[in-house]
Structure formats: structure tokens, C-alpha cells
């Protein structure tokens, strides 16, 4: 499979499913009952891809209804398979995971996801750490790249280990041709995320005040020197007013997360026999809401009800 012509590369994409492109389409049911068959052979786009992903997630929830939406994301990351390896441009990050701006962590596979879900131990709560607003007022000369730095090494603690999930980057840039800016982020482990690339049809002259996101650093340590690169490819100058980092982490050590990665890989590759039955959910397992908290379940506590809640998170999972 390859990236369809209507898709965009993205640093915060978890994974992909099949869809239309290259003259091929998805065959599925059709509520309009065209031709009396109840089917259509011309379905495609994200209208086809997102329901496939939702269906696979529903199968996971049927096996383990106590999974939170963040557990689901971890399982997607660890079970996705590389596709389009020749031009997918996968990058190995500091946690040993491979991510592509074209395909995320790879193709979602229902069997692998369900097998991993059967014995998955729920991750600890998410922790959100925001840097102060980094006031730069840095000039952005024509046809040059400006590098900005943020170091949080002092926050590292052996008693409070953590790994990254999501990273959000807010930037406030004045520029008369914002479509000519390339914005990239480098994690302390050296992982490169392209947050924004050249957009020839973006003629806005108002600059950019926006929050970007990346998951290419998933599983890495959050501590060290972060580097933001702003490449001005135009002949006009600009000004970087300020920027800010938000790190979404969970309290698992990189060493323990590496054990989780190996365990999942052993199960989905057959090195370790996959369990026939899923582990029972703990009696005290909370019912997770759409935002990942445990203060009730507004969409219902059943797997279907929880899936409805998680569908509100799909823009985050499949950007």
C-alpha cells in the first residue's frame, strides 16, 4: 500500500488502514440500496479508513472492555506493521519504534491489536508539563533557518521516570508569506518531526499562531535539549515572537516500556503463544470517559458506548 494522492504527511499520525486510490475503491454496504444490491463498489477516502479503524478498536474493547483510550493508542503504536517500506521513510526513534510521516507507525491489523489487548496492562495517568512561554523575538531572515532551544534536563529524576506520548508545540510567528515556512522539532533523542512544510497555496499574510503536535517521540525520555527549527524559504523576512512546548508523558520508565514493546512483539510474531482468552478486567477497573479520566462514562459503560466516546478522539488518533 502507498499513501493516496489526497492524503497529507503528518507527524502525529498513529497508523493507517486501507482506502481508495490509484483507481481502486472499497466495496461496502450502501444505505441507498443502489441497484437493489445494498452494496457500493466506489467507497473511499477517510470515510472508508476511519470506520475500519473504529471497527478494529471495537474488537479490542470486546476482548478487554477496561482499556482506556490511551491504552488503545499504545496498542496501535506497538502493533502497527510497516507498509510502503521503500518510500515510506520510516525513522527509528529513541525508543526503538519506527514512524513515517506518510503512514504513522504503520498498517493497523485487527488480529495483532486484539492479541496485544488480551494481556495489556493499563498505563498510568497522563501528565501534562508546559514550558513557560519562550519569548524569543528572533528575526527570521530570508532563505535562512533559525534554531531555538529549550532544555528541561534539570527536571529529570530517577525517582520519577517517564516516557513521552504526545508533544505539542505552540508557535507565534509574524511573516508575510506563512506558506513558505518549514517548521521542525528535534527531541532530546534526536528524533526529527516535520510539523509544517511548504504550502504553495497558502497565501496568508497574517503569520502563524498555531499549536502543532507530534507522536514521533513516542516512548522516548522527555528530558534533555529540545530544538525547534524554523526555515524561511521565502525572500521576505519574518519574526518569531514566542513558542511553547507541552509534553504529555506517563510514569513508566524507558526500561520498563522497552519490556512492554518486547512482550507485544513476541505475542504478535508468534515467539510467545498468544493467550486464547483475554485476562479479566480488574473488579476495581474504572470506566474511562472520552478524555481518558475515570469520572464516569457519559457515553455508557459498554464497549459500544465507550467506542462512541472514543470516536470523539479519532481526530487525535488519525490526524
Image: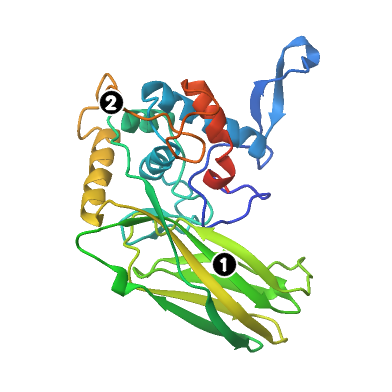
Upstream in the sequence, badge 1 or badge 2? Answer: 1
Query: Which circle marks residue 170 in the picture?
Result: 1
Q: Toward which corner of the image does residue 232 lie, by quadrant?
A: bottom right
Q: Toward which corner of the image does residue 139 lie, by quadrant?
A: bottom right
- The mark lying in front, picked from 1 and 2, is 2
Query: Which circle marks residue 15 in the picture?
Result: none
Q: Position of residue 231 (x, y in %)?
A: 59, 79
For the point 32% across and 42% down, which residue is it? 123
The residue labelled by disc 2 is 282
Q: Position of residue 182 (x, y in %)?
A: 60, 73
For the point 63% across and 47% down, which residue is it? 4
Give the distance between the C-alpha atoms of the residues marked 1 and 2, in whole angstroms: 39 Å
Res. 24 in view:
no
The residue most toward the front is: 295
The residue most toward the top is: 36
Q: Position of residue 207 (x, y in %)?
A: 72, 74
For the point 38% across and 43% down, which residue is it? 74
* Placement of 309 over or under 265, stated as above or below: above
Side of 271 where 110 appears, left or right: right
Secondary structure of residue under mark 1: strand
Q: How crowded is the residue under tag 1: few (<14 C-alpha within 10 Å), some, or many (20+)?
A: some
Amino acid at each position: 500500500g502507498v499513501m493516496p494522492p489526497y492524503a497529507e504527511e503528518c507527524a502525529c499520525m498513529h497508523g493507517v488502514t486501507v482506502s481508495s486510490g490509484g483507481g481502486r475503491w472499497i466495496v461496502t454496504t450502501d444505505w441507498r440500496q443502489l441497484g437493489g444490491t445494498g452494496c457500493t463498489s466506489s467507497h473511499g477516502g477517510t470515510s472508508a479508513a476511519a470506520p475500519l479503524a473504529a471497527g478494529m478498536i471495537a474488537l479490542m474493547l470486546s476482548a478487554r472492555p477496561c482499556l482506556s483510550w490511551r491504552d488503545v493508542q499504545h496498542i496501535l503504536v506497538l502493533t502497527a506493521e510497516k507498509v510502503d517500506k521503500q518510500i515510506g521513510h520510516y525513522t527509528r526513534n529513541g525508543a526503538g519504534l519506527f514512524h513515517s510521516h506518510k503512514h504513522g507507525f504503520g498498517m493497523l491489523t485487527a488480529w495483532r491489536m486484539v492479541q496485544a489487548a488480551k494481556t495489556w496492562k493499563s498505563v498510568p495517568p497522563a501528565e501534562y508539563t508546559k514550558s513557560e512561554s519562550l519569548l524569543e523575538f528572533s528575526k527570521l531572515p530570508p532563505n535562512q533557518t533559525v534554531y531555538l532551544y529549550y532544555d528541561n534536563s534539570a527536571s529529570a529524576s530517577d525517582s520519577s521516570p517517564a516516557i513521552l506520548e504526545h508533544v505539542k508545540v505552540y508557535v507565534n510567528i509574524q511573516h508575510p508569506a506563512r506558506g513558505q515556512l518549514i517548521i521542525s522539532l528535534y527531541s532530546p533523542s534526536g528524533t526529527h518531526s516535520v510539523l509544517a512544510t511548504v504550502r504553495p497555496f497558502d497565501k496568508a499574510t497574517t503569520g502563524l499562531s498555531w499549536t502543532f503536535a507530534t507522536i514521533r517521540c513516542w516512548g522516548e525520555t522527555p528530558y534533555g535539549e529540545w530544538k525547534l527549527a524554523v526555515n524561511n524559504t521565502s525572500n521576505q523576512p519574518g519574526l518569531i515572537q514566542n513558542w511553547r512546548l507541552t509534553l504529555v508523558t506517563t510514569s513508566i520508565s524507558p526500561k520498563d516500556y522497552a519490556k512492554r514493546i518486547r512482550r507485544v512483539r513476541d505475542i504478535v510474531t508468534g515467539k510467545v503463544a498468544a493467550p486464547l482468552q483475554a485476562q479479566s478486567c480488574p473488579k476495581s477497573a474504572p470506566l474511562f470517559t472520552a478524555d481518558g479520566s475515570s469520572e464516569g462514562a457519559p457515553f455508557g459503560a459498554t464497549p459500544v458506548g465507550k467506542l462512541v466516546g472514543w470516536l470523539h478522539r479519532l481526530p487525535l488518533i488519525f490526524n
